[in-house]
Image (spheres, rainbow, N blue to C red):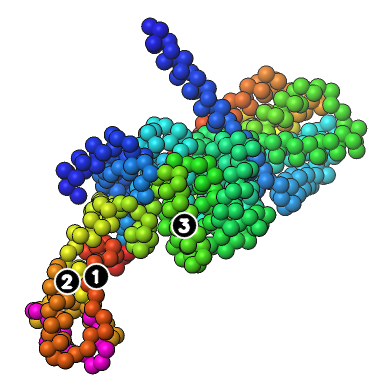
Amino acid sequence: MAALETAAAAARENTVTEFRRQLRCAWVIAKKNARVYYLKGPVVTFGIVFPLFFYLSFAAGHDAPLSVMVPGIAAMALFFTASAVGPLVTPWERQARTFERLVTSPASLSAILAGDVGAGAAFGALLALLPLVAALVLTSAQVSAPMPLLAGWLLGAVAFSSLGVLMAAPATDTPSQVMMLSNLVRLPLIFVSGVFVPHRQMPRWGQWLSPLSPLSYCADLIRVGFGSPSYFGVATDVAALAGFIVVFTAAAHFFHRRTRNRLA
Amino acid sequence: MDRLTIARHRSAATGDTALVADDLTRRFGEKVAVDHVSFSVGRGEVFGFLGPNGAGKSTTARMLTGYVAPTEGRAMVAGFDAALSPSAARRHIGVVPEEANVYADLTVRQNVLLMADLHGVSKAEREQRCSDLLKTFDLDDRKKQKGRELSKGLRQRLMLCMALVSSPQILFLDEPTSGLDVASTRIIREVIARMNREHGMTVFISTHNMEEADQLCHRVAIIDRGRLAAIDTPAALRGRVDSRRSVVVKFAGPGAAPADLLPRPDMEVEMLVDGWRVFSPEPGLVAQHIAAQSQALGLRIEALNTLSPTLEEVFVSITGGSRGRA
């Protein structure tokens, strides 16, 4: 009996040690991604400028109030920045054959993907603060509920980054192919999210599709942060974003593993 | 390879072994890339893995490094099953693939430190190891250069630094000196030999270069069409093709036709610029005969040498070099 307990304790210790090792690998990979892929002028500029003008070009003709426009721009910037580079990292790594280097290192596939998600989420959450802070400084918009805003910001960043990493799974080392797929998925998710057209003004089909977009819940939480009423309910928003994170990361793991076996 | 030999290698695997391939098989759809390959590599051994293109060398190496899962069989690396405990197995290996895979946007130093970091080497130790390795591979004055700025030879040296920074028990090398300049080739071969000699590092080299395998490896395995065709020391393998032993004769002045000097007219002869080479399982006897006949005919011999078959000839004999894929 004592021997069994000792063996179980040793197994638990091994599991904890291995988890810590993989967490460390994920951290190292996230730092590497930030250095190699994210901290580049064009990436930073594109991540901010594109969603900003994309939204403004729509909002300018619609006389949108600040309470709608600022959360909309912030949510769009977060969505674009957190999901922009993730789809490209794995194809870039496959192209440069550095992916093989990571896969033959002690980092598990889960740690590699966690590193990719972590880097994307951190990049998105930090870079999208720029338009948010600028709006707070330059306009009369004010944060009235910081907790929903923070929850939407962090959960949204991780969910969008996970979506980006999932889109990197197809068996290709050509980034342009992944970019096409990425835009094909991301643009419809924006249009049904309520960022451009408030949910209550959407056609019925739009209202049905809206819950399928993680951006809907993130934008809803950010709007609550700026004093607007919630459309889905704060608890639903948080649960839905957490659910998207689980689904996206599980799917990313499944498809990346399948692709790796196919390409190897 | 016969069943008895496989059994011998299996039983050897239970001793002090670093690597065990046990009935490794990998299929890609209908194609069998690696077909029930078994061998073991002892700790501190330099093991060469030879084969023509498409023979299954890289796939076997990739199964051993955990990059590809075997369809059947298993790979044991440093005592860990590569499929069941991949991370544990990979903590003990360093890998240098054939094609350069350094991070082009990271500096030489950052590339090395990244691998140390991934292997969990402590901060103080990784700085020291990085510095030592860069000096060993003559990259110290280039540590701030980006990966993209390096020549092929320098990139190969950097990849070795990246593989060695974690002090692995087993080093996997895929065509380590293919297409490199003389200086890089020499440094790389010297360091591999030294790491093995001084640190007891096990080295698994997948290569086309027979001279390299002959020079560096304690044992070599030859794989052909996914199956292990031979496994032994280079000397023992050479002994298997006695028919490729030979005598080279060169004349000081005008020579003679081989038929006038050879013991038998049907012997295989290869004409050289200033003499000829005759193949025989008994080159000593042939040499004596040539010397005696030359003296009788008044010919002046400049050189008369007996040669063992090269590993390349062994390889061609085993794999059927006429396919010309090596």
Task: Name the residue located 72 percent from the left edge and 35 percent from the top edge.
Answer: A125
Residue B67 figure quarter: top left
Kindly identify which chain the residue marked by label 2 belongs to.
B
Label 3, residues with CA under 10 Å away: few <14, some 14-19, many ≥20 = few
Of label 1 and label 2, which has the lower sequence position? Answer: 2
Which residues are drawn in magenta? Answer: B249-264
Q: Residue furthest top?
A: A1
Q: CA distance from mark 1 to mark 3?
A: 26 Å
Q: CA distance from mark 2 to mark 3?
A: 34 Å
User: Percent position (x, y) of residue B87?
Assistant: 47, 34
Residue B248 figure quarter: bottom left
Up-down relation of residue A235 to residue B194 (above or below): above
Residue A137 as seen in the image, left or right of residue B18: right
Kindly identify which residue carries mark 3.
Answer: B190
Task: Name the residue located 27 percent from the left edge and 43 percent from the top edge.
Answer: B38
Up-down relation of residue B211 to residue B198 (above or below): below
Of residues A155 and B183, the one drawn nearer to the viewer in this rendering? B183
B253 within the magenta span: yes
Query: For the residue labelled by badge 2, is the local secondary structure a helix, a strand or a loop?
Result: helix
Q: Are marks 2 and 3 on the same chain?
A: yes
Of residues A152 and B137, the one drawn nearer to the viewer in this rendering? B137
How many labels sit on residues? 3
Kindly identify which chain the residue marked by label 3 belongs to.
B
User: Percent position (x, y) of residue B130?
Assistant: 60, 46
Question: Please, what is the three-letter code of the amino acid marked with disc 2?
Answer: Pro
Kindly identify which residue carries mark 1.
Answer: B307
Question: Please, what is the three-letter code of the amino acid marked with disc 1?
Answer: Leu
Residue A112 figure quarter: top right
Question: Please, what is the three-letter code of the amino acid marked with disc 3?
Answer: Glu
Kindly identify which residue carries mark 2.
Answer: B283
